[in-house]
Image (spheres, rainbow, N blue to C red):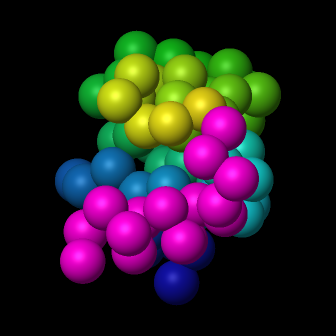
Amino acid sequence: MKFTIDRSSDAAFSMEPDAHFIYVNDEACRSLGYSNEEILTMMVHDIDPIFPKKSGLSISQTLKKEVL
């Protein structure tokens, strides 16, 4: 499965509950203009300034609140 996601034409991300990235595929790197190593040192709010830096919620709770 990792092989397929790595080569997907869609950006794919995986992150910790605190919004730190733990995985990004090649398309995510290309579309954002960062290397894999750079993105893995970042958090969601580093690439999405609208995402709250400290909401007191985990990323999944924040996304559920924003999407639903």
The C terminus - image quarter: bottom left
Residue 6 visible in this rendered orientation of the protein = no
Q: Is residue 59 magenta?
A: yes
Residue farthest bottom in this picture: 1
Q: Residue drawn 25% across and 55% down? A: 10
Tell me which segment is drawn in magenta: 54-68
Q: Which of 53 and 24 is in front in this view?
A: 53
Q: Position of residue 20 (x, y in %)?
A: 72, 45
| Residue 65 shown left or right of residue 40 in the figure | left
Q: Can residue 18 be seen in this view?
A: yes
Residue 59 as seen in the image, left or right of residue 38: left
Please name the predominant secondary structure of the magenta segment in the image: helix
* Residue furthest front in the image: 56
Which residue shows up at 39% across the image and 74% down it? 64
The front one of 45 and 54 is: 54
Q: Is residue 11 magenta?
A: no
Instruction: Give the total number of marks visible in the rendering.
Output: 0
Which residue ends up furthest to the top in the rendered image? Answer: 33
Rendered location of residue 43, percent (x, y)? 64, 35
Q: Is residue 60 above or below residue 46?
A: below
Q: Where is residue 9 in the image (x, y as percent from the top left)?
A: 23, 53
Whole-percent x and y of residue 65?
A: 38, 69
* Relative depth, front residue between 23 and 6: 23
Q: Is residue 37 left or right of residue 60?
A: right
The quadrant in which residue 26 appears is: top left
At 66% from the left and 38% from the top, the residue drawn is 54
Residue 60 left/right relative to 43: left
Image point 50% across, 36% down: which residue?
52
